[in-house]
Amino acid sequence: MKHSILFLITIIISYLNTGYAQISGKEVRKQKNELKAQEIEQLVASKQFTFQADALTTSSGFYKHLDPHYELSMKSDSAFVQLPYWGRVYMARLNDDGGFYFNGKIQNFKFKNKGKKGYELNFLLQNNGDNHHFTLDITRQGYAYLQVSSTRKSFISYNGIIVAKNEE
């Protein structure tokens, strides 16, 4: 009888100890968020990432969800832009594809670390005599907001996420 009580007490104590050793759901989420923040920090610091746009907003307030293949890819000192455009065009060109579809060398690059709020990237790309100014706000969790202003087109913005650059 004495041995069975000791055995039962030992089982209860070991059960309580393992219960306290488990990580709570809140701590697991916090660890995942920190890992994601470190990943985003490395991607932004290396300038080797892709912004995948999932929605756009025009200067007049028109909002549209986008297909998943629209993006802005950065590779150190150059960028590949494939983004649609809705809005007013001030100076149209013949054979204009209607959106932002070009490769370019990044000029006037500025990086700002906003601490817990994330990062801000500003840069200029030129294409066929048109200057495109890009401002990319990135949260520590990888959500991003891209603003594009152009000399020939009205202002437009895109919402999306930051992912690792696909090497193709």
Image (cartoon, rainbow, N blue to C red):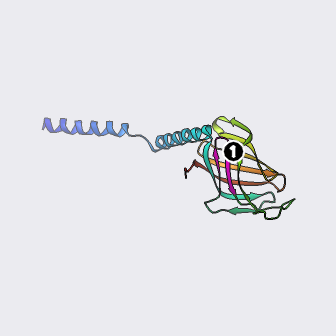
Where does the image place residue 155, in percent across and percent down from the top left? 80, 54
- 13 on left or right of 7: right
| Location of the N terminus (image quadrant) | top left
Closest to the observer: 166 or 140? Answer: 166
Q: Residue furthest bottom?
A: 95
Mark 1: amino acid = Asp
Where does the image place residue 77, in percent across and percent down from the top left? 67, 41
Q: Residue furthest right?
A: 90
Specify whether residue 79 is painted magenta.
yes
Specify whether residue 45 is painted magenta.
no
Residue drawn at x 66%, y 39% is: 117
Q: State the predominant SS element of the stretch in magenta.
A: strand
Residue drawn at x 58%, y 44% is: 141
Where does the image place residue 35, in percent across and percent down from the top left? 51, 40
Residue bearing the label numbered 1: 137
Q: Is residue 36 above or below residue 67?
A: above
- 7 on left or right of 34: left
**Magenta segment, which residues?**
72-82
Picture quadrant where residue 116 is located:
top right
